[in-house]
Image: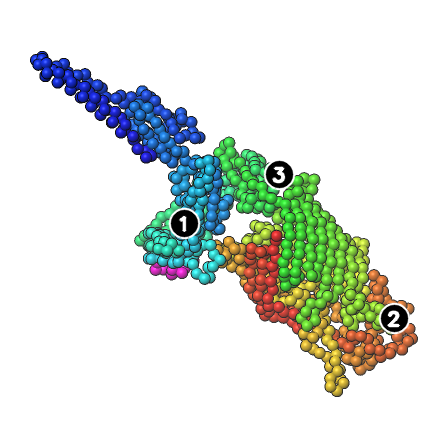
């Protein structure tokens, strides 16, 4: 049997020798008696027992291990005495190696034989039943691996490690059963059968000892949440020991913020229910007394700061409730202020004196003496693709400059805004070669800057959307951006190629070029449905260059050349109006404002923008402001001549606890530089005007705000008299746009807790205000009997082409008839009598509405969600104020995905 000492053969040998000695003496004694010899018989010689000296040691059963290797693990040696104690120790030594599944020792007359059976070699590790934690997360954590020696201790350790991994995920009911599958050549497969079990939730959080604040208030301060139906998407309902310790700190921080300086958590116990499915957490707290601020002061040892002046600027006053968070913020603000004066290592320490008699807390902020610091060196580390100069040119402070903490913060913000490196990058500071020297380090971790994106989605604006783009934001490591994008939806198609150089010729001048083609199908509405109205195709390019005037202000110039073509479906909107057999734009069907827009034109536009930007983030700002003023002048060549100005401003305010309040406003105006002198036709083309509605102002439909024409059909009643159908659902709604607009928005982003933040949920409440106005009143149709109509005096009025003093039809810049005018003369300028011919679709009445600067106001709630299938935005809005003609809409959404 393994491990058993075999000593029986030696015992049998000793007994045989002893018996032989005794038997050999019997004849001698008998002979002495028979001969009668009186002298005493000589005693027989005593045979010594067999020697216990080890003569040899041999190994049996070894396959992979050399005999000498096995002998090195034990203390038995040839020539030494063989004892039971020595044999027992050798067995223990062999067991300690964990190399053998079976082993024994026997002694055959000094020849010691060690018989071993080696542990098998692991062929592979198999995990079964693991769904929540994948193989690539478990295998690196366990000790066993293929081609290693199988040992039971490692199996036990790996089982415990796997269970610990599941406990970290809150699955305390997880079990792991190891199994071994024997293979040929002493090999095995190790199989871990895993039963993950349900996630152990926090069923209840009990708080004992709180009197001033309710259990609900205190639970709201904790990261750990109770498992409820409303917390289905939250990951913070699972038990985590680290989170339990963090929640104790959160409780203490909350009470210290409320003035309870003596607060402490007496105990925090988490109990697992017998079924291992839930935890019950119990906190025992002592609130203590509430303190107020006593004497607050600043003691400055720095010559640049006057103690009395600094004391007068402290945010807290004697008699205010004590707030530990306010003290921490004050220390940070004083340190930052000292940093702007070059004291990088300023030491600001708050000294507290607790007065239990009157429950006050005296606080003295001591500014210790420190040397003024200068930048010794700027180091850039970790960049393998990005060139050093791309990072260094973002530094707002250089070698040899006096240290300034504000400039260091600005540098950090600028490098973060590049988007080339890790999130939350910070410029690190370390001591230089002398006490008044500091080294600034940019330890960057590069991240991929190339983007290949395919996306699909659906929105209430564009219906189905497809998009593809490829972009490199750090081309050749120079910080350049190159991109190509293609977009397709039901109402628009576009393709664009772009290139941007942020530092032209290594100077602080940005330059870029865009080449594009855009096709846009405009629409009007009939019976609340979108129907194609006209198509605008634009081919062009844009050149731009910008220079910074200050750290936050930039001047940007641009030149744009566009070739536009506006067309309609001729089978729908063209007919023989004059009866001469030549189809032309039927203004009864489309409106004369559209007929005047058709054709090709060229726009040569020179633009100039002045921008101020102090936002802390371009993607999701939380503080700072952004102001832009731009102007565009069209007319340096081309057919279009106008001037357009726009202004936009936004301010973000962090309110604390995750609340972010923002205010934004914008406005614009466009004015033609030449008049067309055509009655009822605006000098600014339809396609150059502003439009307002969804998504700019929520609560209104797309192009739902501003001037519009409702085209109402005439029908005959039972008596044959014409009546107009005024139902909005039966009217064609044509938005005309405006030459001026303004828009304002106030929005409050509401935090939902860490669980919702992990899911990317960001709800907000908002109020939008805006208006669109300023077009010339168009010539309107009112033809109950068809082509003929009457003016306000009852005279017959006919619509004819606008003609000059020679009687020729006036043409626009594209060579199309410029428009129509009304005349009471039944004879046209060619001397041909007008006939009462009913033109198809001419029994209409047009109503002009919405041209008002009166504000439209809407309020509502919206949610941004970074969902697993892409960005999602949903808004519910209610209109408080509108004008006749405006189209409202309560619900909008936009969703997309990437694959």
105, 601: nearer the viewer: 105
Q: Residue 438 appears at what percent x and percent y?
A: 52, 36
Q: CA distance from mark 2 to mark 1?
A: 88 Å
Quick check: 192 above or below 665?
Answer: above
Q: Is residue 496 visible?
A: yes
Residue 323 colored in magenta in the image: no
Q: Which residues are magenta?
A: 210-220
Q: CA distance from mark 1 to mark 3?
A: 47 Å
| Label 3: element kind | loop
Q: In what element is the residue under mark 1? A: strand
Kindly identify which numbered label has been placed on residue 131: none
Horizontally, residue 849 falls left or right of residue 891, namely right
Q: Nearer the viewer, residue 81 or 855?
A: 81
Q: Examine the image and state in which quarter residue 301 appears.
A: top left
Determine the CA span between mark 3 and mark 2.
Answer: 69 Å
Dot 1, how many residues are within 10 Å of its Cα: few (below 14), some (14-19), or many (20+)? Answer: some
Q: Nearer the viewer, mark 3 or mark 2?
A: 2
Residue at the far bottom: name it: 719
Q: Residue at x 80, y 58 (%)?
A: 601
Q: Which residue is mark 3?
A: 385
Image check: 453 left or right of 368?
A: right
Please give the label number shown on residue 581.
2
In the image, what residue occupies the spot 69% across and 67% down?
530
Q: Is residue 669 visible?
A: no
Q: In this image, 747 relative to 167: left or right?
A: right
Which one is earlier in the sequence, the residue at label 2 or at label 1? 1
- Reading the image, the residue beneath label 1 is 175
Q: Nearer the viewer, residue 835 or 457?
A: 457
Q: Secondary structure at mark 2?
A: loop
Q: Is residue 716 above or below residue 583?
A: below
């Amino acid at each position: 049997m393994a491990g058993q000492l075999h000593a029986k053969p030696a015992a049998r040998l000793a007994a045989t020798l002893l018996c032989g000695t005794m038997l050999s003496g019997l004849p001698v004694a008998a002979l002495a008696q028979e001969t009668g010899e009186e002298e005493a018989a000589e005693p027989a010689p005593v045979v010594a027992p067999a020697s216990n000296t080890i003569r040899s040691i041999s190994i049996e059963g070894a396959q992979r291990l050399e005999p000498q290797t096995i002998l090195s693990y034990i203390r038995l040696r040839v020539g030494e005495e063989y004892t039971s104690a020595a044999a027992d120790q050798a067995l223990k030594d062999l067991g300690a190696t964990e190399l053998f599944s079976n082993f024994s020792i026997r002694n055959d007359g000094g020849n010691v034989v060690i018989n071993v059976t080696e542990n098998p070699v692991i062929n592979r590790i198999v995990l079964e039943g693991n769904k929540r934690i994948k193989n690539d997360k478990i295998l690196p954590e366990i000790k066993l691996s293929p081609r290693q020696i199988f040992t039971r201790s490692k199996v036990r350790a790996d089982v415990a490690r796997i269970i610990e991994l599941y406990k970290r995920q809150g699955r305390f009911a997880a079990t792991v059963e190891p199994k071994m599958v024997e293979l040929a050549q002493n090999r095995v497969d190790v199989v871990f059968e895993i039963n993950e079990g349900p996630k152990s939730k926090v069923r209840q959080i009990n708080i004992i000892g709180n009197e001033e604040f309710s259990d609900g208030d205190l639970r709201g301060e904790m990261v750990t949440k109770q498992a409820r139906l409303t917390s289905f998407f939250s990951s913070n309902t699972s038990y985590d020991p680290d989170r339990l310790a963090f929640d104790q700190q959160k409780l203490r921080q909350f009470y210290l913020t409320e003035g309870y300086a003596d607060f402490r958590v007496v105990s925090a116990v988490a109990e697992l229910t017998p079924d291992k499915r839930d935890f019950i957490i119990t906190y025992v707290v002592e609130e203590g007394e509430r303190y107020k601020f006593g004497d607050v002061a600043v003691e400055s040892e720095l010559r640049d700061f006057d103690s009395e002046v600094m004391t007068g600027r402290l945010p807290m006053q004697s008699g205010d409730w004590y707030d530990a968070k306010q003290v921490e913020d004050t220390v940070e603000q004083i340190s930052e202020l000292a940093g702007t004066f070059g004291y990088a290592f300023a030491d600001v320490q708050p000294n507290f004196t607790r007065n239990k008699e009157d429950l006050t807390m005296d606080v003295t902020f001591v500014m210790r003496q420190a040397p003024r610091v200068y930048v010794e060196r700027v180091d850039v580390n970790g960049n393998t693709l990005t060139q050093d100069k791309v990072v260094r040119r973002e530094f707002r402070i250089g070698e040899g400059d006096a240290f300034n903490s504000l400039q260091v913060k600005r540098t950090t913000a600028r490098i973060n805004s590049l988007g080339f490196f890790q999130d939350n990058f910070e410029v690190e500071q370390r001591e230089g070669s002398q006490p008044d020297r500091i080294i600034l380090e940019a330890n960057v971790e590069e991240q991929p800057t190339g983007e290949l994106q395919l996306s699909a989605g659906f929105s209430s604006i564009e219906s189905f959307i497809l998009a593809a783009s490829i972009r490199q934001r750090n081309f050749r490591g120079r910080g350049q951006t190159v991109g190509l994008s293609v977009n397709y939806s039901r109402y628009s198609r576009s393709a664009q190629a772009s290139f941007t150089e942020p530092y032209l010729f290594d100077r602080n001048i940005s330059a870029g070029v865009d080449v594009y083609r855009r096709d846009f199908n405009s629409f009007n509405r009939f019976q609340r449905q979108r129907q194609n109205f006209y198509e605008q195709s634009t081919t062009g390019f844009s050149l731009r260059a910008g220079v910074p005037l200050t750290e936050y202000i930039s001047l940007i110039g641009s030149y744009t050349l566009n070739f536009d073509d506006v067309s309609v479906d001729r089978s729908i909107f063209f007919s023989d109006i004059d009866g001469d057999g030549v189809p032309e734009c039927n203004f009864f069907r489309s409106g004369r404002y559209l007929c005047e827009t058709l054709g090709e034109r060229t726009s040569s536009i020179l633009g100039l923008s002045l921008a101020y930007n102090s936002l802390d983030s371009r993607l999701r700002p939380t503080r700072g402001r952004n102001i832009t003023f731009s102007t565009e002048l069209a007319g340096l060549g081309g057919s279009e001549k106008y001037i357009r100005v726009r202004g936009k401003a936004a301010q973000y305010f962090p309110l604390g606890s995750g609340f972010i309040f923002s205010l934004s406003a914008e406005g614009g105006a466009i004015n033609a530089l030449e008049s067309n002198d055509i009655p009822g036709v605006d000098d600014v083309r339809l396609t150059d005007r502003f439009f307002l509605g969804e998504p700019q102002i929520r609560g209104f439909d797309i192009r739902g705000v501003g001037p519009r024409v409702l085209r109402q059909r005439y029908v005959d009643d039972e008596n044959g008299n014409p009546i107009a159908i005024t139902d909005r659902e039966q009217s064609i709604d044509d938005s005309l746009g405006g030459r001026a607009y303004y828009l304002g928005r106030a929005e409050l982003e509401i935090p939902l807790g860490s669980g919702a933040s992990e899911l990317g949920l960001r709800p907000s409440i908002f109020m939008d205000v805006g208006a669109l106005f300023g077009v010339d009143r168009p010539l309107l149709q009112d033809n109950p009997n068809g082509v003929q109509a009457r003016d306000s005096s009852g005279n017959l009025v006919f619509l004819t082409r606008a003609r000059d003093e020679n009687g020729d039809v006036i043409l626009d810049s594209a060579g199309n008839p410029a428009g129509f005018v009304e005349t009471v003369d039944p004879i046209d300028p060619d001397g041909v009598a007008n006939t009462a011919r009913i033109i198809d679709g001419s029994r209409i009445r047009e109503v002009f509405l919405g041209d008002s600067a009166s504000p439209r106001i809407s309020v509502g709630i919206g949610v941004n969600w970074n969902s697993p299938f892409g960005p999602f935005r949903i808004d519910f809005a209610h209109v408080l104020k509108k004008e006749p003609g405006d189209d409202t809409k309560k619900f909008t959404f936009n969703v997309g995905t990437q694959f």
